[in-house]
Image (tube, helix red, strand yellow):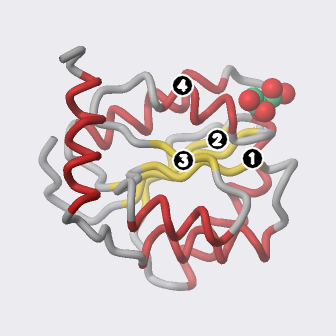
């Protein structure tokens, strides 16, 4: 998985549409480049949108992603079916920070019916700014990669 540009991929289903639009406003206000993979508020199936975002990361077109559905859970289940994707569904700031620091998460999943915009903004900020600590955590992330390959 090669990453060429720092473009964030973002996607949602109808349960996450309002929060996704709010997050887009936050990203725009903070000069964070993103590509929106939909949906546009219509009723859709969340695995399709998780797939679009994850493929953009796998191809290297985007470096990380944010997926929003009603709970964030369906999106995280769908995203984690993709090789090289480490998706974390978070609704507290400690988890959002630690999943970057320890798991090198590359997709943040949020529940539009779970978190409000203020908390979501904090979660996104932590997800974008927290560095992976590497070291002993790299060994464990490598083990996740090995599981991807059924080793
Ligand atoms: C859609 O109603 C809802 O099921 C979906 O947004 C999500 O919460 C699934 O995990």
Distance from disc 4 to disc 1, alpha carbons, whole Å, reads 17 Å
For ligand 1, give the image quadrant: top right
Q: Which mark is residue 78?
A: 4
Q: Label 2, secondary structure: give it.
A: strand
Q: Are marks 1 and 2 in contact (CB under 8 Å)?
A: yes
Q: Where is residue 141 in the image (x, y as percent from the top left)?
A: 27, 46
Residue at disc 4, CB closer than 8 Å to ligand 1: no
Closer to viewer: mark 1 or mark 3: 3
Q: Residue 88 carries which label?
A: 3
Specify which label sits upstream in the sequence, 1 or 2. 2
For the question of whether residue 77 can be seen, the reply is yes
Q: Label 3, secondary structure: give it.
A: strand
Q: Nearer the viewer, residue 92 or 138?
A: 138
Q: Residue at x 58, y 22 (%)?
A: 47
Residue placed under numbered mark 1 in the picture = 17
Q: Which mark is residue 67?
A: none
Residue lying at the far top in this picture: please name it.
Answer: 150
Is 20 positioned to the left or the right of 116 in the image? Answer: left
Residue lying at the far bottom in this picture: please name it.
Answer: 30
Q: Position of residue 51 (x, y in %)?
A: 45, 27
Distance from disc 1 to disc 2, alpha carbons, whole Å, reads 6 Å
Closer to viewer: mark 4 or mark 1: 4
Q: Which of 83 and 51 is in front in this view?
A: 83
Q: Label 1, secondary structure: give it.
A: helix
Q: Do the residues labelled 1 and 3 touch (CB within 8 Å)?
A: no
Residue placed under numbered mark 2 in the picture = 12
Closer to viewer: mark 2 or mark 3: 3
Q: Residue at x 71, y 65 (%)?
A: 92
Please state, as top left, top right, bottom left or bottom right, where the N terminus lies in the image: top left
Residue 121 to residue 8: above or below: below
Q: Residue at x 18, y 17 (%)?
A: 151
Residue 129 to residue 147: above or below: below
């Amino acid at each position: 998985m090669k990453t060429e540009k720092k473009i964030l991929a973002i996607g949602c289903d109808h349960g996450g549409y309002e929060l996704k639009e709010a997050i887009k406003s936050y990203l725009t206000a903070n000069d964070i480049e993103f590509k929106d993979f939909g949906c546009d508020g219509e009723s859709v199936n969340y695995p399709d949108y998780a797939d679009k975002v994850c493929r953009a990361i796998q191809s290297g077109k985007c470096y990380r992603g944010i997926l929003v559905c009603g709970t964030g859970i369906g999106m995280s289940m769908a995203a984690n079916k993709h090789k090289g994707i480490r998706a974390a569904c978070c609704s507290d700031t400690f988890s959002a920070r630690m999943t970057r620091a320890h798991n090198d998460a590359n997709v943040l999943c949020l529940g539009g019916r779970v978190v409000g915009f203020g908390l979501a903004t904090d979660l996104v900020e932590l997800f974008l700014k927290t560095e992976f600590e590497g070291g002993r955590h790299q060994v464990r992330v490598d083990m996740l990669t090995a599981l991807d390959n059924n080793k």
